[in-house]
Amino acid sequence: MADKLFIFDTTLRDGEQVPGCQLNSIEKIEVAKALEGLGVDVIEAGFPVSSPGDFNSVIEISKAVTWPTICALTRAVEKDIDVAAEALQYAKRKRIHTGIGTSDYHIRHKFNSTREEILQRAIACVKYAKRYTEDVEFYAEDAGRTENEYLARVVEAVIKAGATVVNIPDTTGYCLPQQYGAKIGFLRENVKGIQNAVLSTHCHNDLGMATANTIQGVLNGARQVEVTINGIGERAGNTSLEEVAMIFKSHRETGIETNINSRKIYGISRMVSSLMNMPIQPNKAIVGRNAFAHSSGIHQDGVLKNRESYEIIDPKDVGIDDNAILLTARSGRAALKHRLQLLGVELEQGILDKVYEEFLKLADRKKDINDDDVLMLVGKDRTARQRIKLEYLQVTSGVGLKPMAGICLNIAGERFEAAASGNGPVDAAIKAIKSIIHRNMTIQEFLIQAIDKGSDDMGKVHMQVEYENNLYYGFAANTDIIAASAEAFIDAINKFVK
Ligand code: KIV
Ligand code: ZN
């Protein structure tokens, strides 16, 4: 009989903690609904006490989603738990995720405490959370570096206090797969009452081992995995949902099954990348642009004769359909709507009409419209509501000419014009913008990407701007790469100039 593995998605909590990846409530609801469609069992919707935005998002997601359990994170602090319970009031199924650091690093340096005291705090927070819901998950932060005997004492005590799920995070991404698997195995064997709770993996990717550790955890008895779409998360990220789902789908001999509808993976992956302005590395397993691209002649020949010669997954199984109708200037609204639905985006008729108008303009400039272009158009409608907008940009540059840019910004309805020169047209445009927005901001990272092959392709610009010790991400796409650079800079500025 198949063994069910629960998928706990934390894209909207651990994933969203990445600087610059913050989403507004509407965007979070969009992602939460797509996660529901994908078949996840639990959505960690936020850390309600951390900000009013997180609090509201947990409320709104609880209202918008029906089937998955909605989970809210807390520290082992009564106030956090009270606030989480309030935020979860509309959830049809709710879970409080509470916990504390259990490694000696945390106990001594973070809490200036003792193992005994931390054990008591762990028990107390679980008991307190039980006042609000039966479904309480406990996390032992930095369990990866917690000594196994002490960890087992903590796990046993919190299960006795009522925890229904116990999360064993490798918070720093330190463990080797065999160590992490052994840790889960040790808990299964040495904790009295372990049959009364589900053990959960939560692995970070600092040494590139998050997925391997998660799989070892499951093979040793964990039955919940905490994952994010595209593996996004702080530093090197979390375990990626799509990798775990496809590993167990490909390795039937494990007997492990998930509820994930794998054909929806590609769509939600693009959606999250586009909403969070986080590009997916081209060679990323399962969802990277090159994941199914065979360039060597020998491989191409083999795949054409029999796909399984070089492919272990049919691209269609993750929602990549090579035969999908190409979008061109002759495509109608229905084709655009259909493509958006495949990408997990549902638009109201009025917004669809606006996006379709922009689509036709783009299709006049570019022959084939790909998925990234379509998602960019949806994003453009979102940026149209920003406070600072680019009205026009004119540049002169070329061999023997001094690069110059003239620019007009519309700030909350008022127009501001400026001109500047620079060492190239992009530098000139950025300087012109800076001469209107007088802030001490510096560009820390600037990435220009072209997705397709042709010279008519869209240029995508990702930018990180530092302002008052915080980093803000900006993104824009345009067939004019200088305009895209200026728009990405303005997109970042909109995040801190209110
Ligand atoms: O990585 C971690 O330890 C966490 C916990 C807060 C669950 O994200
Ligand atoms: Zn984490």
Image (cartoon, rainbow, N blue to C red):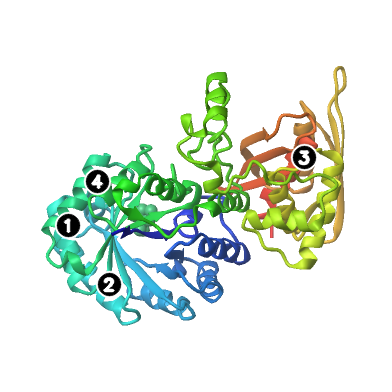
Assess whether mark 1 and mark 2 are in contact (beta carbons under 8 angstroms). no
Which residue lies at the image location 64% right of the left edge and 36% below the top edge? 446
Q: Which mark is residue 125?
A: 2
Q: Which mark is residue 167?
A: none
Assess whether mark 3 and mark 1 are in contact (beta carbons under 8 angstroms). no
- For badge 2, the amino acid type reads Cys
Q: CA distance from mark 2 to mark 1?
A: 23 Å
What residue is disc 1 on? 188
**Quarter of the image holding residue 206?**
top left
Q: Is residue 278 left or right of residue 132?
A: right
What residue is disc 4 on? 180
Foreground mark, 4 or 1, reads 1
- For badge 4, the amino acid type reads Tyr
The quarter of the picture where the C terminus appears is bottom right
Mark 3 burial class by Cα count in 10 Å: few <14, some 14-19, many 20+: some
Q: Secondary structure at mark 1?
A: helix
Foreground mark, 2 or 1, reads 1
Which residue lies at the image location 56% right of the left edge and 23% below the top edge? 301
Of the two numbered discs 4 and 2 on the same chain, state the one appearing first in sequence: 2
Q: Secondary structure at mark 2?
A: helix
Mark 1 burial class by Cα count in 10 Å: few <14, some 14-19, many 20+: some
Foreground mark, 3 or 2, reads 3
Q: Is residue 175 left or right of residue 88?
A: left
**Quarter of the image holding residue 80?**
bottom left
- For badge 1, the amino acid type reads Arg
Q: Which residue occupies the foreground of this view, 370 or 105?
A: 370
Of the two numbered discs 3 and 2 on the same chain, state the one appearing first in sequence: 2
Which residue lies at the image location 50% right of the left edge and 47% below the top edge? 230
Q: Is residue 46 visible?
A: no
What residue is disc 3 on? 368
Ligand 1 within 8 Å of disc 1? The answer is no
